Image (spheres, grey):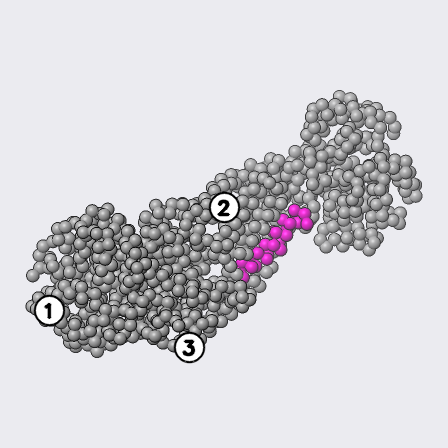
Amino acid sequence: MSASLNKVTQTLKEVIDAPIASYFESCVHCGLCAEACLFYTETGDPKYTPIHKVEPLRRVYEQEYTLLGRLMKMVGLSKPITDDELEQWQELVYDSCTMCGRCSLVCPVGNDIVYMIRKFREGMAVSGHVPDGIRSATRRTVEIGGPMGLKWPAVANVLKHAEENTGLTIPVDKEGADYLVLLSSMEIVNYPEYIEALAKVFHKAGISFTLASDAFEATNAGIQIGASDIARVIVSRIVDAAERLKVKYVLSPECGHAYMAIRWEGPNLIGRPYGFKVVHVLELLDQLRQEGLLKMKDTFKDPLILHDPCQIVRRGGVLQAPDALIRQVAENYIPIADQQKWNWCCGGGGGASAIHTEEAEALRARAFGVKKRQIEAAGVGTVVTFCANCRITMEEALDHYEMNTKLIGLTELLAEHLED
Amino acid sequence: MNELQLLTWARGPGLDIAVGIFVLGVLWRLIEIYTLGRKKDLAAPRRAAGASGLHTVFRRSLAPPGMLKRSPVSYIGGYTFHIGLAIIVFLGAPHILLISNLTGLSWPALPAQLIDLVAVVTMAAMLVMLFDRITKPAKRFLSTFEDWFTWTVTFLPVLTGWLAVQHLLLPYTTMLALHILSAEILLIVLPFTKLFHAFTLFGSRWYNGSANARKGVPV
Amino acid sequence: MQGPLIDTLARQGVSRRTFLKYCATLASMMALPPAAGRAMAEAMAAARRPSVIWLPFQECTGCTESFTRSHSPTLEGMIFDMISLDYQETLMAAAGHQAEEARHTAMRDNAGKYLLIVDGSIPLGVDGAYSCIGGRSNVDLLQEAAAGAAAVIAVGTCAAYGGIPKANPNPTGAVSVSDIVKDKPIVNIPGCPPIPVVMTGVLAHYLTFGSLPELDDKGRPKAFFGETIHDRCYRRPFYDQGKFAKTFDDEGARRGWCLFELGCKGPVTYNACATVKWNGGTSWPVESGHGCLGCSEPDFWDAGGFYKALSVPADPLGFTAAAAMVGAGAGVAGGFANRAKKSTAKKTHEPVTLDDLEVPK
């Protein structure tokens, strides 16, 4: 066995647990997970059937952790995993899986397939069977500080502009603030309006907040690539800063997988519960709305639909806030059939949007078909979402299909119509 | 060996062996699977109505929104043959007698003609499911020898039971012996094939449901 | 007794009309065309009675009783008038060497033409010493008599299948006629005891057509053994409705519900009891409130107990407790091995670095 394969099996042996065993033993090959996966429904290619994407993991489970599998392995009747095979599976595990978790919701025997993908990626990562795009994003996050290679001076610059635009102070490294605000590189670079919106809301509600110069980046490429050791390094920056600044809350930005990383995976990565609470920005906004602190001066008139980002809603549990907030600001909000936890992914989650091979981009464009149909069926010109990654993925796809649909971030939309 | 001896063997040593292997296999596999354990989730949980492992154990028996339309054969066929099998096994008079003999529990049976009808419907549903497995790309793609094999060992007890009652193909005694033997084969292979989902699906649904319930998502 | 059968019958007060009626009934029971009844009557009435040698082996005489001990003389009893019974220990007046002489004479005079009737099983243990007649073992006598017989009729379950003597553990090494005789046509008329009319039917067929009736794969006349007791049982509708007597004295038993749960072997027993009945059509076991024992089936004595329903275990499950222990043991052992393996993997874990993410060289 090659050194890298040995690493794969060692890693998978560490991560395979009772749920994974139970899931594999329960699968009856009914193929219904395929019907929940946009990569299958849009291409019709059976290799994109979700449970098939973890086939090598199943074999390792069987060969390492079942008595019969061990016997078969001993007498040479089982098929060991190979490097070639893992290379072939890279496309299935990364390019064509956004870890949207829709399959985990339909599996009739109850298999949490996205949980299995997440574990399988640990093995793929240690053996280097990962897409270049995600690999370099991970390297930049660890070595520079963010997936896009953004450094603090650039962020400080954006903050300065925001201060000028709003006339409000944006505190940095302020000890004892209520909230530590995290950002995602995508927002800093592409949607700086988010920061201004946030400053306005905090000011209005009279809540103290701060940014940390050494922990402004909320995204965590380590989670996307599936390397927990690296993800721990990245998440620890935030935990350290939050504890140093003694904040009560850490505010996750709109970005989906950032929320997943800091809210749900973080404590498990560092091996202890937090001393602070992690709140998604929409949860905070909804709380302010309920307290009557989020009043609108006017409403948004154009008909629109909402795109629920998987990692925040279905996988993150922020189920009610988005709907309540959009109704607060939009006059012509059109609810769609598959929404909230049943939403369809944009096609770029789980790190997929960082993969820039021709095949991956073509596949993403095809997978967008389901979203395209939703937009067309609703007959709207505007889509509101609350994840910078969904937004950039959808913008690329809209360009590809030459659609004139406008994309707006929910926080930004709220800020625009916020009472002065 | 004549057919009455075959039947007596099937009812005697055969059943003993089959139930023995079944019990052995079920305990072995369940312990092997669930002792693997899992890490405690350290993230602060969020609570939501309708979200728990137990909720998911029951909720997953219903077709999720839109899925019935996407895969009608899987759902309607699946429901029909699962419910049909349950009716035949748990409401057929001779089967209740067997259960009562093994466990002491007993309840009223359905009329034999109704069980006959259910058996026919169940077999029809299983044939449709087989056809679906052959023709549907994703299902066909996933199918291995085990899928065809387990279909066969599930189908045979229903078929032989029905043939025996209807006096078709072979004398009743022989068919009854074959029926009991085929059910014994089913018992023996159950713990070691995907048929074990009859046990693990509760664990799987519970794991999925409870993990997502911590995030406040009813799945 | 010499002369045609019809004369004999007349002397006994059986009219020609009664005899004709009986033959018609017999023909219909055997599923023969109506004309066969008349043919049968004529053939039998005029037939030269064939020589019959009846050998009793390991038996209880119940089969003979079945034919002879009716409360009133029946037509079945008249079968003894159809034939020239040259040797039958129970019935014959002769004894000892005289009896043996009669047998030898019959075998010699009718070589190749006589019918051999056997009741009882044949013990093979200790060189057949368990049952001897005139110092010769049953198997020896059977082989000798069968050699010159035109056909052999195995009467009763013992002769047909070994019966009760053959029941587990079969101390005498009992076997059936067909286990010994391989080169002669054999008719099996199983039952403990067999139904008399079946015997009459077979003989009538032989006398009329000069051949044996159509047999099934177990050598039984199809006409009488074509269907199960269960299929022809008057209680069958209760089975179909799921109405069962649970004990011999409950409401269901009083109402005459199905006896399946009380161990009735009707579903796996091929015989004509349900249609022909016993004691001159008076009643039969199921009608009297007891399930069928399956006495006309091979090895009925060892078929899991008379009072155990067919769908319940024939023997108590003996392995289950041990299997549960072994299963739990294997599971726990596997579990420990798995946990050890997993913790080793965790202990030897080397932190993943950025370099690990690179494509392996």
Picture residue at 65% right of the left edge, 33% below the top: C275
Left or right: A187, with C84 as reference point: left
Rounded to the nearest angstrom, the CA distance separating label 3 from label 1 is 50 Å
Residue B192 tag number: none
Which region of the structure is painted magenta? B1-24
Q: Are marks 2 and 1 in contact (CB under 8 Å)?
A: no
The amino acid on which the numbered mark 3 sits, given as a three-letter code, is Thr
Q: Nearer the viewer, residue A130 or A252?
A: A130
Discs 3 and 2 lie in a common subunit: no
- Badge 3 crowding class, 10 Å Cα cut-off, few under 14, some 14 to 19, many 20 or more, is few
Q: Badge 2 is on which residue?
A: B88
- Badge 1 crowding class, 10 Å Cα cut-off, few under 14, some 14 to 19, many 20 or more, is some
Q: Is residue A34 above or below residue A211?
A: above
Discs 3 and 1 lie in a common subunit: no
Q: Badge 1 is on which residue?
A: A161
Indicate the position of residue B13 as horizontal and vertical percent values: 62, 55
